[in-house]
Amino acid sequence: MTDAKTNSGNLSPLFHPAAHYGSPDDVLNDADLSTSEKRIILSSWASDMFAVESCPNLREIPGMGHTIRLADILAALRRLDGEDDGPPRPGGATMRLRRPRAAALIAMSTASTARAVS
């Protein structure tokens, strides 16, 4: 018979990202990590579990000697996802779509006016 509780007291993870990385950019620049691994580390740092109680836009990661801004973590996640391209370039004229019923009313009004004038 096996004892299911043999590992229950050992809840500390084997890998502590804070011991290896000092910033979100350090995580992004590590060529040995896959995109998924980078996303896991950054997402865990963004978790509310590490939020500073009096300042929720900061994260205090255990093992790291300084706080990290949540905005920096989220920016790193956006870069990882390729969403850091900025807003789209301004382009051609905007297109104004008319509702079908409004267009029909305008056409009828124009036709009525044309008949009244002739």
Image (cartoon, helix red, strand yellow):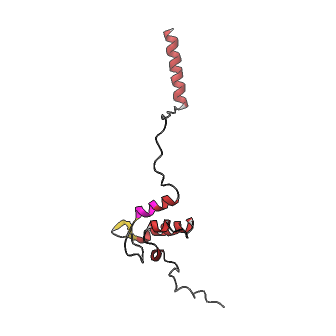
- Percent across and percent down for residue 18 are 45, 75
User: What number of labels is visible?
Assistant: 0
Residue at the right extreme?
A: 1
* Residue 25 visible at all: yes
Q: Is 73 above or below relative to 91? A: below
Q: Is 13 above or below relative to 77? A: below
Of residues 58 and 28, the one drawn nearer to the viewer in this rendering? 28
* Residue 46 visible at all: no
Q: Is 47 above or below relative to 97? A: below
Residue positioned 44% across, 64% down in the render: 73
- Percent across and percent down for residue 83 are 50, 54
Residue at the bottom extreme?
A: 1
Q: Is 83 above or below relative to 42? A: above
Of residues 113 and 56, the one drawn nearer to the viewer in this rendering? 56
- Percent across and percent down for residue 91 are 48, 38
Q: Quadrant of residue 62?
A: bottom left
In which quadrant of the rendered image does the N terminus lie? bottom right
**Magenta portion: prevailing SS class:** helix
Residue positioned 38% across, 76% down in the render: 65
Residue at the top extreme?
A: 118
| Magenta segment boundaries in residue numbering | 70-75
Query: Can residue 77 be found in the magenta stretch?
Result: no
Residue positioned 41% across, 75% down in the render: 64
106 left or right of 52 in image = right
Residue positioned 39% across, 72% down in the render: 60
